[in-house]
Amino acid sequence: MFKIAIVGASGITGTELVKLIKKHKSIEKVDLFSFTNAGKKIKEFSNDLIEHDDVLNNFNDINFENYDLVFFACPNGTVMKYYDALMKSGTKVIDLAADFRLDSEKDWENFYKIKHLHPEDLCNVVYGLTELNREKIKASKIIANPGCYPTAAILAIYPLLKNNVIDHKTIIVDAKSGFSGAGKQKIDSGLGSQIKNNLIPYNIFQHRHQIEISQELSKASNNPIELTFTPHVLSVYRGIIETIYVDLTEKISEKQIINIYKNFYENEFFINIEESKIVELKDVVNTNNVSISCHANKKNKLIIVSAIDNLLKGAAGQAIQNMNLMLGVDEKTSLK
């Protein structure tokens, strides 16, 4: 049985973590921490936690040594401030922000506009995309949990690059997310009303997840990825659906492409390769699943549709999946 801490427990991702941890059969104790809401009860921040009276503790009082694993569901730049103390402690760490997602100091500071406090370790922290880095995750002390858009994109494109059947220079990702991905602060500032009956493209050519997607896909192709990525906010609360356009490098049937996916993701519980329909958002909402469908024409064009729940497989669910690996329990625990 394990002892867990969740830092940033009152945010959107934090409350998702709490919900999953509360039903986890291998967790003996969970303590919740906040920088700004200490003293309040967790049920004030989610209707799904209305039966739980856990009080949020002040983060300044945390002792990392008391826990087997600590989640940080906090803004970018938080974990690197406490990195030295965390590495000296006996706890394992999962960071749901972007502090250690990128390998390059230059890229990180260019996209996040913050000076990185531990650039020498950027290449050493394992990127927590579970299906691709499972064995490394098992052996790690600290994990960089991937972004939501990158999770849907990388898992959809990686097998095709690995098998050298698509052009690495012409990838287009048209991504749409529920507005929960914007975070509690932006929702409280009026995004909810702005997005009603609307669809908003944003951060064209500037989104931070673009470099994250390119970085990880380059590892599959051994070539720099030239990626066009456009994110949009949907008028729904949760879920991500991405329509991905690629060029095939050889004559290959849709059935052969499906077989590439099925062979690559053989025995992966959370990945569904759809053969009979186009993937929809409702296929994955409130699950830790990834659903992928592919659609080829006779001109070597391929469209891939990839869908996840941004708050689960795109954040808290994948973090729990990684925690399970790091603690040596069944990977599916509390996620089925």
Image (cartoon, rainbow, N blue to C red):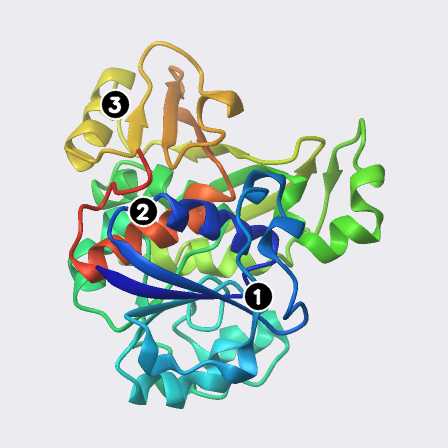
Gap in angstroms between the C-alphas marked 2 and 1: 19 Å
Can the viewer see residue 143? yes
Residue at (45% x, 22% y) in the render: 283
Residue at (75% x, 39% y) in the render: 200
Q: Residue 35: where, in percent of width, then height? A: 62, 74
Depth check: 18 or 237 in front? 18
Residue 68 sits in which quadrant? Answer: bottom left
Mark before the other along the chain sequence, 3 or 2? 2
Mark 1 crowd level (few <14, some 14–19, many ≥20, 10 Å Cα): many
Q: For the residue labelled by badge 3, is the local secondary structure a helix, a strand or a loop?
A: helix
Drawn side of residue 82 relative to residue 260, left or right: right
Mark 3 crowd level (few <14, some 14–19, many ≥20, 10 Å Cα): some
Gap in angstroms between the C-alphas marked 3 and 1: 47 Å
Residue at (38% x, 50% y) in the render: 21
Q: Nearer the viewer, mark 3 or mark 1?
A: 1
Q: Amino acid at mark 2?
A: His
Q: For the residue labelled by badge 1, is the local secondary structure a helix, a strand or a loop?
A: loop
Q: State the mark number for residue 24.
A: 2
Q: Amino acid at mark 3?
A: Ile
* Cβ atoms at labels 3 and 1 below 8 Å apart: no
Q: Which residue is mark 3?
A: 258
Q: Is residue 315 above or below residue 33?
A: above
Q: State the mark number for residue 56.
A: 1
Can the viewer see residue 170? no
Depth check: 317 or 17 in front? 17
